[in-house]
Amino acid sequence: MTGEGRREILVAEPETAGERLDRFIVRRLGDVSRKAVKRALDGGRIFVDGRSEGRAGLLLAGGERVTLTLDLPAPPRMAPALPILYRDAVLLAVDKPAGLPVHPTGDGGPNALEGLDSLLHSRERGERPILLHRLDVDTTGVLLFALHAAANRALAGQFAGREVEKRYLALVAGAPPPFFRVENRLRPGMRGRTVIVTKGGQSAISEFRTLGRGDGFSLVEASPRTGRTHQIRVHLAGEGFPLLGDILYGGPVTLPLGGERVAVPRHLLHAARLRFRHPTTGDGCTIEASPPADFLPYLERISRTPSIR
């Protein structure tokens, strides 16, 4: 067995004679299921008088010494604390880390919505936060929620009307031109991909500005005018400048950096800024998130140090 486990030593009393091994263990421990005992038996982790035993139905004679190691239950996966970027009575913006889905998934793991529960437990209203837009699992940065139904309606209208200004930072392979614009049509493809099509699909528009270049990579500002799934990733890859670490769209997973080849653990895309009209006051509202730590080694090697805020 690898890893940690719960180790127990039991001595069968004389009156246990004739009792099955698995039932004896369950009875003595009290908080262990027969399924857990079966897993330990199958894994060779139960010994009777020093000999490995795999039979659940072994009948005890009384007086045996039973040594077993059980799997420890996996600790519950908790959503990480989400840094608050902005909060008022009707809006909440957090800085989403890489690897965190924005909504519940089928595996029961943590997600950004659950991560808000601890932040909002003191709210008097029982309303759940409403997700206003989405970020891919490995995309970091500004994630905005409405805390009131009316605010959700007002901002949903701004998103639908393309009135919300979205600014991303992207670390890409190659040397893109100073400015470029991509306009095409996208639709869902196979195995979670989004594909470019000539007919059908949905209109997708992105504008890009190159902020600086390193050795084999560049820092690009992406401004999507529409909000299609994987839009920035597909548009960059389609132009020949895939995101670093974007396996799905052909981005490099290693890169020479500082004299050695380093692994790129995720696609390096960061939601840096949202601008919109506040749903209550109508005033302009700007929310920004600084680049995450795994961007910094690349930013330090940009030949023309850009202003990224």
Image: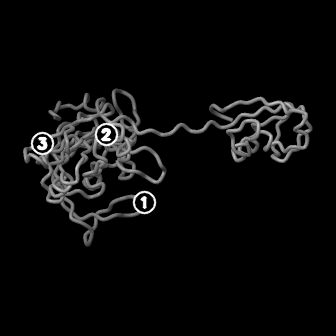
Measured in 3D between alpha carbons, the distance from the residue under mark 3 to the one under mark 2, in whole angstroms, is: 22 Å
Mark 2 residue element: helix
Which of the marked residues, 3 or 2, is nearer the chain's N terminus? Answer: 2
**What's the mark number on residue 285?**
3
Which quarter of the rendering shows the C terminus?
A: top left
Tell me whether the residue at label 3 lies in contact with that at label 2, contact meaning CB atoms closer than 8 angstroms: no
Which of the marked residues, 1 or 3, is nearer the chain's N terminus? Answer: 1
Kindly report which numbered mark, 2 or 1, lies closer to the viewer in this rendering: 2
Residue 122 versus residue 208 in the image, above or below: above
The kind of residue tagged 3 is Cys
Q: To which residue does mark 1 refer?
A: 191
Mark 3 residue element: strand
The image shows a total of numbered marks equal to: 3
Mark 3 crowd level (few <14, some 14–19, many ≥20, 10 Å Cα): few
Measured in 3D between alpha carbons, the distance from the residue under mark 2 to the one under mark 1, in whole angstroms, is: 36 Å
Q: To which residue does mark 2 refer?
A: 120
Q: Work out which residue is located at the far front of the displayed protein and give it.
A: 124
Which quarter of the rendering shows the N terminus?
A: top right
